[in-house]
Image: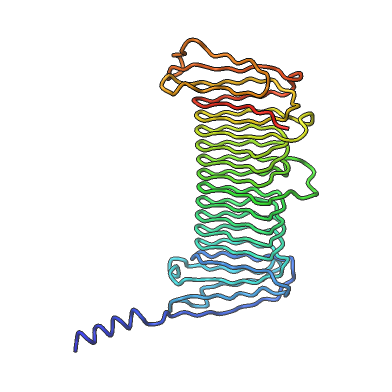
Amino acid sequence: MRKFIIILMVLGVLFSPVIGGTFEKEFSVTPGKKLTVDVQTGGSLEIRGWEKSSVKFIVSYRGSRFEEGMLDFYQDDEGVRMEVTNGEYYNNIGLNFEIQVPSKFDLDINTMGGSIMISGVEGVITGQTMGGSLLLDNLKGKLKMTTMGGEIVLKEAEVDGNLKTMGGEVLFEDVVGDIEGTSMGGAVTFRNVKIKDSTSRAKEGVVKISTMGGEIKVDNAPLGADVHTMGGEIRVKNAKVFVKARTMGGEITIEQVDGWIDATTMGGEITAVMVGDASKGKRDVDLSSKGGDIDLTLPAGISADFDIRLDYTKNSSQDYKIHSDFDIQIEEAKEWDYLRGNPRKTISGKGKIKGGQHRIRINTINGDIWIRKGK
């Protein structure tokens, strides 16, 4: 009987309902003011814009240690402020916040841990979380947010600014504006990211992406792409003006660019296709790989000065070649060079086409080089 009672007690603890609840608070405000949130305990936040002239908080929690007094609310000429303090005592109560604000409202959000979701708001939006996702959609205005460890998703927005994560993927989709995405350890993808019609300087519309360890994908860069990863593939589908790409360990693929190219990889292949009217704008090319094939397609009518170099080492297959549809002179060294690490020989290609206006510089080690004539 005693064992039976103990078992019932254990089952009662395991299957008893979790104590928790919700409470609400609402403030009348004027659109255009500011919401400030400082959650020192951590907790997820979901903020949505609505057409009412008020800020409404719905706070949910679990456990019996919650007290409404742990939340401090303030209202002044600047707007509304919510603070959650005494994080050491309350950090295990599982706080979640649903907040509705006027559709035109500034936001300043800070949480010690938890995802931040923002939708349907126009204004100056800043914030950070020490560990959680940033999920953002249907925003307008200026945006500057950081997460120390989580993904970033920005969709259907018209914003200027930057988003950073220290360890997660970044996705921008259907975005208009001068926006920069940075990840210290995850893939970065731009899909249908466009520049505002009012942009007056080309550099304001450049797609800028940096990640310490992940692939980069750009669908469209109408005023150029400047992308860098410490370890991953780079793929640019369509760009104008220029593409500048750097990776320490991955392939670079530029499907088409109407402008100049500067691409370097420490260990991977490079494929690039230049399109458009070669008589307009800068058309220089600088491609470099420390270990991979390079395949470049140029417009048939380009005015170019070719400077091509292919090194192969003595311990390699030694059957690498420069293949060119353009009329350039190709020569191979007869003797091995012992002064640069592994013994190597150099195959060089030089020549000027139609006056040699644009410099085409290509070099690789232990890889083939193709220079193709496009349309």
At x 72% / y 66%, what residue is drawn? 33
- Percent of width and height locating residue 196: 76, 50
Quadrant of residue 317 within the rendered picture: top left
- Percent of width and height locating residue 105: 71, 65
- Percent of width and height locating residue 95: 50, 71
Q: Is residue 79 above or below residue 232?
A: below
The outermost residue toward the bottom is: 1
At x 46% / y 13%, what residue is drawn? 336
At x 74% / y 30%, what residue is drawn? 282
Q: Quadrant of the N terminus?
A: bottom left
Q: Is residue 258 above or below residue 367?
A: below
Q: In the visual, does 140 lie left or right of 114?
A: right
Using the image as rendered, state which of residue 64 and residue 176 is in the foreground.
176
- Percent of width and height locating residue 13: 33, 80
Quadrant of residue 369 within the rendered picture: top right
Q: Quadrant of the C terminus?
A: top right
